Amino acid sequence: MAEEYDLVILGGGTGGYVAAIRASQLGLKTAVVEKKKLGGTCLHAGCIPSKALLRSAEVYAQTKKSEEFGVVTSDVKLDFLKVQERKQKIIDQLHGGVQHLMKQGKIDVFHGTGRILGPSIFSPMPGTISVEFENGDENAMLIPKNVIVATGSRPRSLPGLEIDGTLVMTSDEALQLEELPKSIIIVGGGVIGIEWASMLSDFGVEVTVLEYADRILPTEDKEISKEMQRLMKKHGVKVVTGAKVLPETLVKSDVVTIKAEHKGVEKSFTAEKMLVSVGRQANVEGIGIENTDIVVDKGFILTNDYFQTKESHIYAIGDVIGGLQLAHVASHEGIVAVEHIAGENPSPIDYVSISKCVYSSPEVASVGYTEEQAKEKGFEIKTGKFSFRAIGKALVYGESDGFVKIIANKENDDILGVHMIGPHVTDMISEAGLALVLDATPWEIGHTIHPHPSLSEAIGEAALAVDGKAIHS
């Protein structure tokens, strides 16, 4: 039996379920089709589980050096199964919360695989959704006025580098480890690779990172990348940049061995496990795109500023359209798409003003242009930088590595970018994000009185440093 809806969303991840809630608020009859679990990658195989493991790693590493704080402990042990149990408990609690929100919003949830059908007896336009259930029940037919594709992404691998899930893994399999390896090779020094390098190193694993680019975290400001590489090495992580991994040299036995070309020479690397972290690819297969005029370019669905595809009643959001593949980005894309469907006239998203975070130890957070990007855009810039070593709260915490860097436009004093590496910076970046949205100047941030002692004082001092007026430098 076919059922009519104002909106059907393919995918119940962060972007999809947030879009559904906003649609419900606007009075749209809404359904979500999700073939796995509500919450998607972020909740079940990404943001939340990885951050739960990172927190356990942080506590373990801090406990081992607790005598520095006058707290004497002995025989500190890691129970990795309990670490995994804690992770799962958090996931289950949040999953229950998402399910409650769906019921609260009277949003219908279909647990199955959704596919877009072409023009049919149900609709003269493509967009009818066929839902195939794994239990063998008869397919459901959903007839929506509008569709949002929010099918997300999955880990990518290198051509020829086979993922077996045991010796050679992606983050999906690594999150399910029952015991830690003694050593690991991480292929890729981007955000996910560095988070895993930090986490596993804190857990006591011997870590080697192989990065193709000339620096780790290549999308961050160069000074941030340089500082992170220094601190990774300080923590015992072996970092090799400019390393071209050669998949055809992979040898698997009870360990993994692979060669990489580095400075014109082939070098061999061996470890118990390998984690491949070279980006993510959109889930565009098997959802019926071929039955529409939707354009897929370089593996991602093309949309306009309001996330409409070439089929104006079919929208797409989140990882499936590329760009910033971040949960908070997908959520806001979903809100904009729904508000456009409802005729609310939303403003397009300014992606430059979106904060990005790396939850490693130390953390990294940034918003706006890097120094290199600002110069490429033609801005004449001035910068200010302030170290956490001069911040009392950082010394109290025992985490004083890192700095805050602010980039401003010399012509009109507008802030162009803010970049941080250090303790808890992922919790501080929103001040900088608000500054960008409000076209604030370093003077305005510098003359905002930051509480003492607090880590946020580093932002105020960095802002003053733009004009050479930092107090504690």
Image (cartoon, grey):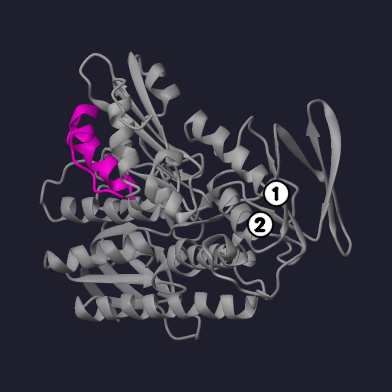
For the magenta stretch, what is the residue range? Answer: 428-453
Residue 72 is situated, as x and y percent measured from the top left of the image, at 59, 71
Left or right: 469, with 113 as reference point: left
Q: Measure the alpha-carbon separation of dots 1 and 2.
A: 7 Å
- Residue 47 visible, this orientation: yes
Q: Residue at x 40, y 29 (%)?
A: 385
Rendered position, 140 above or below 399 = below
Q: As shown in the figure, which amino acid type bears the numbered disc 1?
A: Gly
Please name whichever residue, 43 or 341, is drawn nearer the observer in this view of the structure. Answer: 43
Which residue bears the numbered disc 2? 201
Residue 74 is situated, as x and y percent measured from the top left of the image, at 66, 75
Left or right: 298, with 294 as reference point: right
Q: As shown in the figure, which amino acid type bears the numbered disc 2?
A: Ser
Left or right: 254, with 74 as reference point: right
Which residue bears the numbered disc 1? 236
The answer to which quarter of the image holds residue 34 is: bottom left
Q: Residue at x 57, y 65 (%)?
A: 66
Please name whichever residue, 177 or 144, is drawn nearer the observer in this view of the structure. Answer: 177
- Residue 308 visible, this orientation: no
